[in-house]
């Protein structure tokens, strides 16, 4: 097996993104889903307005529909004709000197060209209305088609559905909608030392935490995680399990990709015809990350140490899962914040340091957690970001503006005051 040289993070990311960009629309699958199940998912169809909006001249207020020419001299006494509620269409045509009580959302009756708010009217008796404020033509009326026209674009293929989009789709009657399928992601932990989470590790054993770490990351990215049975460090077992894992759109293999005698994942990949594109990235943590493909399937060999696995996923698996859902292969957005304490980093690699990122007023603050390296997931509990220390940087000082990848929401914001 040829040894591939270590890539910079940028070059490795570019390679992953290039592979994502090679995927065409026809490589992505779609499915029809009930609108209720569609929140947060990506549209596989564009949707257009099925009617003008509003679909009729709509009263914007509770009040009286009138002819504006009747109410230029005040007070104006008009004949009361009756009422029109939301959901009704009045069969009456308003003539000079007449008024019809109207509710918000009701169609303005023929003949009327303005609505006067009820606050500016009086009812001297049951047959009359007195108008106390003049209005120009079209006052308080949303004219048919004034917001949007039938056939106008509402949402485009590739858009993510938020609450507003769902509301819009419901308005145009889309109870079923075509969405890109969520990619299935096989998660294969490897290692003779692993026991399952509900087991007590014997001497020399540890629990398989990576499967859970990755499971949640896949969910967060909109994929469907499928945990496979853990593979031992044995060629036959690895071959079987990797083969099973290849039934998914993406296969994540954790462990077995370093330099140890029993790190057998790469030779097994090659044996199975999985093409390896990189096997080392100049980064800390996460150096022995493997990116590979077999046909349409994407395969990642993630380093066994939990923090390495986590960081490698955030960097390299994210763009693939986005692409497979019909979003572009966007990488993590970079935020900036002020460092709270000094960082010394002499690994000679691009380094991703766990940190707590918060804004308690006065801008985004970045506090690196005391962290003991790639196996130390415990010190990361509560961290929500990674400080990006560039390749050539050895020291960062308190107050420096640093790049951050935010992998969880920032919980600490100043409160709104209105
Ligand atoms: P490896 O890359 O297989 O040499 O693993 C590197 C380190 O990560 C070792 O200390 C492993 O025990 C640990 N490790 C591997 N797989 C897992 C896992 N699924 N959960 C937690 N730790 C793991
Ligand atoms: Mg191992």
Image (spheres, grey):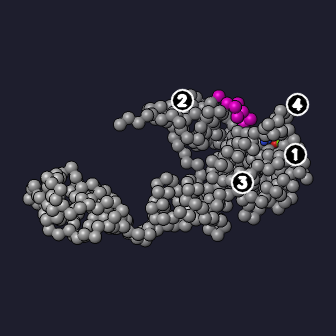
Q: Which residue is mark 3?
A: 185
Residue 397 seen in render:
no
**Residue 386 visible within the image:** yes
Q: Which one is earlier in the sequence, the residue at label 2 or at label 1?
A: 1
Q: Which residues are magenta?
A: 370-379
Q: What's the residue at 45%, 61% (across, down)?
A: 171
Which label belongs to residue 203?
4
Query: In 3D space, how far apart are the residues under numbered discs 3 and 4 (Cα atoms)?
Result: 32 Å
Q: Are marks 1 and 4 in contact (CB under 8 Å)?
A: no
Q: Residue at x 75, y 44 (%)?
A: 211
Look at mark 2 in the image and give the residue it sits on. Answer: 340
Nearer to the camera, 90 or 310: 90
Q: Quadrant of residue 395?
A: top right
* Label 3 CA crowd tier, 10 Å (few <14, some 14–19, many 20+): many
Which is nearer the N-term, disc 3 or disc 2?
3
> Callout 4: helix, strand or loop?
loop
Mark 2 vs mark 4, CA separation in Å: 41 Å
Residue 94 belongs to the span the image colors magenta:
no
Compare marks 3 and 4 and give the one earlier in the sequence.
3
Does dot 2 land on a helix, a strand or a loop? loop
Task: Judge from the rendering whether residue 255 lies leftward or rightward of residue 354; answer left or right.
Answer: right
Residue at 59% over, 39% down: 385
Residue 325: image quadrant is bottom right
Q: Residue at x 27, y 54 (%)?
A: 62
Tag nearer the camera, 2 or 4: 4
* Mark-to-mark CA distance, 2 and 1: 43 Å
Return the residue at label 1.
Answer: 232
């Amino acid at each position: 097996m040829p040894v591939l040289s270590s890539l910079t993070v940028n070059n490795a990311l570019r390679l992953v993104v290039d592979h994502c960009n090679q995927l065409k629309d026809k490589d992505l699958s779609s499915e029809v889903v009930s609108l209720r199940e569609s929140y947060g998912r990506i549209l596989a169809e564009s949707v257009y307005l099925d009617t003008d909006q509003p679909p009729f001249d709509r009263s914007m207020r509770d009040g009286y529909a009138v002819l504006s020419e009747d109410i230029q001299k005040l007070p104006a006494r008009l004949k009361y004709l009756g009422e029109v509620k939301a959901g009704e269409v009045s069969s009456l045509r308003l003539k000079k000197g007449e008024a019809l009580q109207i509710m918000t959302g009701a169609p303005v009756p023929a003949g009327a060209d303005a609505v006067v708010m009820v606050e500016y009217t009086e009812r001297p008796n049951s047959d009359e209305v007195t108008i106390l404020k003049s209005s120009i033509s079209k006052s308080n009326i949303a004219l048919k088609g004034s917001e949007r026209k039938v056939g106008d674009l509402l949402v485009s293929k590739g858009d993510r559905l938020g609450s507003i989009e769902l509301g819009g789709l419901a308005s145009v009657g889309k109870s079923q909608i075509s969405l890109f399928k969520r990619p299935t992601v096989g998660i294969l932990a490897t290692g003779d030392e692993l026991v399952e989470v509900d087991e007590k590790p014997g001497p020399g054993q540890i629990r398989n935490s990576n499967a859970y770490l990755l499971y949640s990351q896949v969910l967060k990215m909109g994929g469907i995680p499928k945990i496979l049975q853990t593979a031992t460090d044995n060629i036959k077992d690895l071959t079987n399990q990797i083969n099973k894992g290849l039934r998914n759109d993406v296969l994540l293999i954790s462990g077995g990709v370093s330099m140890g005698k029993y790190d057998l994942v790469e030779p097994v990949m090659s044996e199975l015809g999985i093409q390896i594109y990189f096997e080392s990235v100049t980064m800390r943590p996460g150096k022995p990350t493997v990116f590979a493909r077999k046909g349409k399937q994407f395969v990642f060999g993630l380093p066994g140490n939990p923090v390495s696995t986590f960081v490698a996923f955030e960097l390299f698996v994210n763009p693939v899962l986005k692409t497979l859902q019909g979003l572009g292969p966007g990488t993590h957005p970079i935020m900036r914040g002020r460092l709270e304490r000094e960082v010394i980093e002499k690994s000679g690699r691009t380094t991703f340091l766990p940190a707590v990122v918060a804004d308690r007023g006065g801008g985004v603050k970045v506090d690196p957690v005391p962290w003991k390296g790639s196996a130390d997931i415990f010190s990361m509990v509560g961290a929500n970001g990674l400080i990006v220390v560039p390749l050539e940087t050895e020291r960062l000082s308190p107050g420096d503006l640093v790049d951050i990848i935010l992998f969880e929401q920032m919980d600490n914001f100043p409160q709104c005051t209105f």
